[in-house]
Image: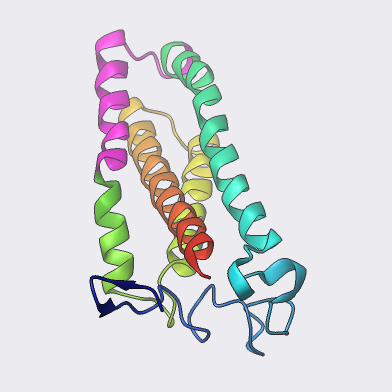
Amino acid sequence: MASWKGREEAPLLSAGEEGGGGGGGGEGGGGGESGGLWGGGGKGRVGLRVYVVCSWVLFLEGMGGLSGLALSYFYKSTLKADPALLSSISSISALPWTCKPIYGFLSDAYPLFGFRRRPYLALGGAAAALSWVYMATYVNDPWTGGVCMTVGSAGMAVANVMAEAILVERSQVT
């Protein structure tokens, strides 16, 4: 345990919590104390699984920026939205990114299924994916598209916060 000005600090993750890396619960992936190749977590190692998940979330976040041009054409050509409406919808759909600290506080205060990060990561990713599927198949007016964009943006923001939190927690375990 590290101490600061004479006070003991507890580790961020114990062996039984998510990201602990070891144990036989299957969460670590490797089953040993070090968690194996995919689990990491033991003795300060960050597992390959953590890198893959976090890299994938951040890659998808970056790829979301590429969809902006296609969305603009979709709104203008297919949905016949004027530039003012498109600007309003884009602004509203960016609002979930301003609430990122709240997502972290909620996941810390209300763990789901005994975990603080993974369920929120999965739910955020599922919400984002489903909103894009709905956008591609059922949207036929600008405001429904705006709702889909906002839900997708919120899902990606939640997944981004959780992936970054997992990466920070795993990198601080020593």
Which residue is at the front of the view, 103 or 171?
A: 171
User: What is the span of residues highlighted in magenta in the rendered image?
Assistant: 77-98
Please provide percent x and percent y for residue 38. 72, 67
Please provide percent x and percent y for residue 169. 46, 63
Q: Main secondary structure of the magenta part?
A: helix
Which residue is at the front of the view, 9 or 127?
A: 9
Quadrant including the N terminus: bottom left
- Left/right placement of residue 81 relative to residue 35 reads left
- Left/right placement of residue 53 relative to residue 89 reads right
- Residue at the extreme front: 6
Residue sitting at x 46%, y 52%? 164
- Left/right placement of residue 39 relative to residue 132 reads right
- Counting every numbered tag in the picture gives 0
Q: Is residue 143 in the magenta section?
A: no
Residue 93 occupies quadrant: top left
Residue 20 occupies quadrant: bottom right
Which residue is at the front of the view, 113 or 100?
A: 100
Please provide percent x and percent y for residue 143. 30, 31
- Name the image colouring: rainbow
Which residue is at the front of the view, 23 or 153?
A: 23
In the rendered view, tell whether residue 135 sits above or below residue 165: above
Residue sitting at x 61%, y 76%? 21
Residue sitting at x 49%, y 43%? 134
Please provide percent x and percent y for residue 171. 52, 60
Q: Is residue 78 in the magenta section?
A: yes
In the rendered view, tell whether residue 2 sits above or below residue 144: below
